[in-house]
Amino acid sequence: MTALAALAVAAVAAPKAEKFVAPEVLAEADRVWRLGEQGDASEAARQGDALVRAADALRDVDRLEEAREYYRRAGLVRPWDFATKLRQADTLLRLGDSAGAREVAAPVARYVETDAELAECRRFTGAAEPAGLPRLADAPPAADEVVIALVATPTTERWLVQTVGRALAAQLGARVTLAGTDWAIGKADRTGRVFLANELRRTLPWDDPRMGLVRLNGEKFKPENLNADQVIELMRTLLTREANAKGLETLAARVAAADKVLQWSGPGLLPRLQADFPPPAQGRVVYLALLPVDLYAGRSNFVFGSAAGEGGYAVVSYHRFAAATTGEPPRSERLAERTMKQLLSSLGFALGVPRCADPGCARSYPHSLAEHDAKGTGLCATCRAGLARALGHELPAAQ
Ligand SMILES: [Zn+2]
């Protein structure tokens, strides 16, 4: 064959190159797998990406039988890598092994915290979508009834709304309904710039005489009067005067990161909730908005919820309870439990039940997520009595 003819053959064969898995990808995966086999599970887990890469590469070129084995190995090394497990289940399904796909996806379905992942799991487990809560519009309160109505935003996880809704109904013996699923909370009230500015306030050389020469917008300034943007601007001005290129670059990166942190004012959302969900013609409705976004109030850096005292309205955030925020491995049951405690707490305030001092009670004040987790899920006798009075009926016996 002439050189030219060889080139022509290569050109024709070119599309097949897409179906190629580099041998070093598989060699690397095999090396990591051997690490685990030799007893170094921690190192194998640390380098587990190599197994995932090999499995994905094989799956991409339809070498599914081989992909199956590499996914199996990846699953053993990294049992908490749910995204990979779902690709493993998909591979098994494509191989006709629906029982295997179900076996891989079923434990994932018990742990994931998002609707999207749950829907993906259901493709393999065949589980039915859980029934939604009854809609408030279909079942308004009777004349002497107090109904709890959950309000969701378009991005609130629906499974969480349904799970806590059912749990609330069981614990309180009250009807829990869904008032809306597309509540619009508008733009964030502030960004992480407030936290960045607080840090900068501590590092700025306020007592340095040269600070007296700095002008902001041509004005002399009083440190206590500066808002977050002005503190950041002051730092930028100082770094510019010092020609500190590295410092300016770091500051720009920190500002960019701060702008990605969004917070809504809990007390600020309450009047909007009130306006969008007016009281019913008869009976009483307590509106509880369940939000995926972070909330703050007053001087607090964050709050888990805000309620209008006796007003029948509360907003609750599960942002700081979710694995996506805490960095914990996902566990839907933990997320639902944390959210329930806060809903009970805020619901009580919305109904005029005072704060609780019993650390074991779901309604006691947590200063941190750790304290929130340490609380029980049940209600103390005082809170049970207070909620019973407010709801107009005895609560079911505690489980
Ligand atoms: Zn209590």
Image (cartoon, rainbow, N blue to C red):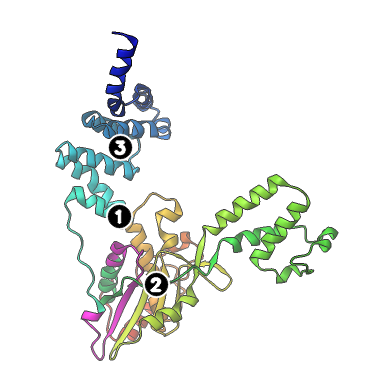
The mark closer to the camera, 3 or 1, is 1
Residue 338 versus residue 212: which sits nearer the camera?
Answer: 212
Q: Which residue is mark 1?
A: 116
Residue 328 horizontal/vertical position (percent): 42, 50
The mark closer to the camera, 2 or 3, is 2
First of labels 3, 1 by sequence position = 3
The mark closer to the camera, 2 or 1, is 2
Quadrant in which residue 324 is drawn: bottom left
Vertical side of 179 occupied by 341: above or below: above
Residue 95 horizontal/vertical position (percent): 17, 36
Image point 14% across, 38% down: which residue?
A: 96
In this rendering, does residue 131 appear at all? yes
Q: Which residues are magenta?
A: 137-163
Question: Quadrant location of the N terminus?
Answer: top left
Say what amino acid the circle numbered 2 marks: Ala
Quadrant in which residue 342 is drawn: bottom left
Residue 203 in the figure: left or right of residue 76: right
Look at the numbered disc 3 and give the secondary structure of its residue: helix
Say what amino acid the circle numbered 1 marks: Ala
In this rendering, does residue 174 appear at all? no
Vertical side of 200 occupied by 173: above or below: below
Vertical side of 142 occupied by 194: above or below: above
Q: Residues within 10 Å of mark 1 (few under 14, many from 20)?
A: few
Image point 20% across, 62% down: which residue?
A: 130
Q: Residues within 10 Å of mark 2 (few under 14, many from 20)?
A: few
Distance from Cα at disc 2 to Cα at disc 1:
21 Å
Residue 338 horizontal/vertical position (percent): 38, 63
Q: Which residue is mark 2?
A: 184
Distance from Cα at disc 3 to Cα at disc 1:
21 Å
Look at the numbered disc 1 and give the secondary structure of its residue: helix
Residue 148 inside the magenta-drawn segment: yes
